[in-house]
Image (cartoon, rainbow, N blue to C red):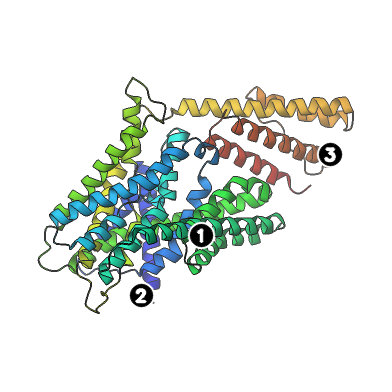
Amino acid sequence: MRAVGTILFLVVLATAVATFARRWRIPAPSLLVIAGLAVALIPGTPPLHVPPHTIALVVLPPLLYASAEELSVRDLRLVWRPVTVLAFGLVLASAAAVGAIVMAVTPLPPAMAFVLGAVLASTDPVAVTALGRRLSLPGRMQVLVQAESLFNDATSLVLFRVAVGIAVASSTVHWPMAAGQFVVLAGGGTAVGAVVAGLVALIRRRTTDPVLDSVIALVTPYAAYVLAESAHTSGVTAVVVAGVLLGRSGHRLSDARIRLQVQAVYAVVVFLLESVVFSIVGLELPALVRDLPGDTGLWPLQAAAVAIVLIGIRILWMLPLTAVVRPRRDGRSLRTAAVVTWAGTRGVMPLAAALSIPLTAGDGQPLAGRELVLVLTTAVVVFTLVVQGLTLAPLVNRSGLALEPEHTAQEEASARDALTRAALVHLDQLGDLETLPEATLKRMQRNLGARLDHDADGAPADSADAAYRDLRHEIIAVQNTELRRLYDGHRISDTTRRRLQTDLDREESALGDR
């Protein structure tokens, strides 16, 4: 009963905080963490301890899946080289740098310092996606930040397992074995994710019930995660691969009515899970601090040092990569590096990894330094979510890299005109064939002509007019084809494509079945 009450309280708190975040135009994750901290510091608040498997199994799969589905595969092809460098090289460099600074400024033994470095080495896709969702970044930059956080899991997970093995068993590092473990984790997770995506695609093509399709969409990330973990591969990688593949082909797997319902269901699920999990981050820190030994009172300074090192190593690693993102002499490359660096926040996944550290060493004794690792991890996560989260939007605005609202509106208007012209051309072809009543064709041409002139949308379709309704379905199919052509030809952004696709889906759904 207490667990149910806690969950209900978190949902109510998250809903209220998210409402104020939108009104004040503050990133919701940052405000949720602050609210969690404030509640935890109220005298009498019971300590919150969340089992790590709860976050890893219940919360992460759908959030990772939603982030992966939003990833633009078209733009990913343009940035795969820097993403690869960041997902491998930067993770290794960050782990080494954090381990070195932790050994210098904390009483942690070298093995546990390496564990902390592995935990904090990678950016968090849940936090990155949640913070970047409202930013008007260019498509390539948004994909670079998001893809890096999605694809660095295998590297950090191998480092974490190696580090925990050293700390628990006091064993030596066998790098060939670690390399083989990386291949198994990354390659196996990729294979499982691809198989799950293929099976789900076959099922969804044969599903016409929106409720059943929504259930399939909700079960998919959990199926990918559980199957991959059961095969001793990376469940996170499997979920990401499944999400990317299904997100790329989603418009071909279902009709407009199903797509709209699945989007609505997932929007609610993602909101609830993100809200609860970021609140938990803030709620857990005071409880973890109370469990610290008495000789670790310098943890705030130690956490600040770790956070500064993480940001510093990211800056040093990012500057050479700006050559890939269209370097310019006007300082744009430096501004790009600054934005991409500041967008690399830590979040839920490092916290889940730290909570999964074993309680005892191989000899049965309590694992020395575990409490401090948990506190430093949570403190760094809170620091990045609050400090970087609250200042990321102003930094993007000052950098001059954000897309202006006028640019986005003009792109969308031009794309709508292109869709309307493609529909009119198709109507002219149908008129030459004389396969439809002339009155129906004229009515559709007036409707589309009004849209092209940016007037009213024209008279709504009469549900009793079967010929007009069938023609409108055909026109929407032509416009969907034109929309994909515009997107594949790099004439519109992924954001514009999704917005126009949703509008076409709503219009088609309102027409009813053919």
Tell me the residue that label 1 is attached to.
188
Q: Residues within 10 Å of mark 1 (few under 14, many from 20)?
A: many
Q: At 43% from the left edge and 27% from the top edge, which residue is drawn?
A: 404
Give the image location of residue 433, x and y in percent.
Answer: 88, 28
Q: From the image, tell me which residue sits under label 2.
A: 2
Q: Is residue 339 left or right of residue 424?
A: left
On the picture, is 164 further left or further right than 302?
right
Closer to the eye: label 3 or 1: 1
Separation of disc 3 and disc 2 at Cα?
Answer: 59 Å
- At a point 62% along the width and 29% down the height, the residue shown is 416
Residue 146, image quadrant = top left
Which residue is more in the foreground, 58 or 241? 241
506 to 364, vertically: above or below: above
Give the structural element (helix, strand or loop) at label 3: helix
> In the image as oriented, which residue stretches furthest toward the bottom?
364
Number of numbered discs overlaid on the protein picture? 3
Say which of 29 and 217 sits in front.
217
Residue 235, percent from left and from top: 47, 61
Picture disc at residue 467:
3
Give the position of the N terminus as an image quadrant.
bottom left
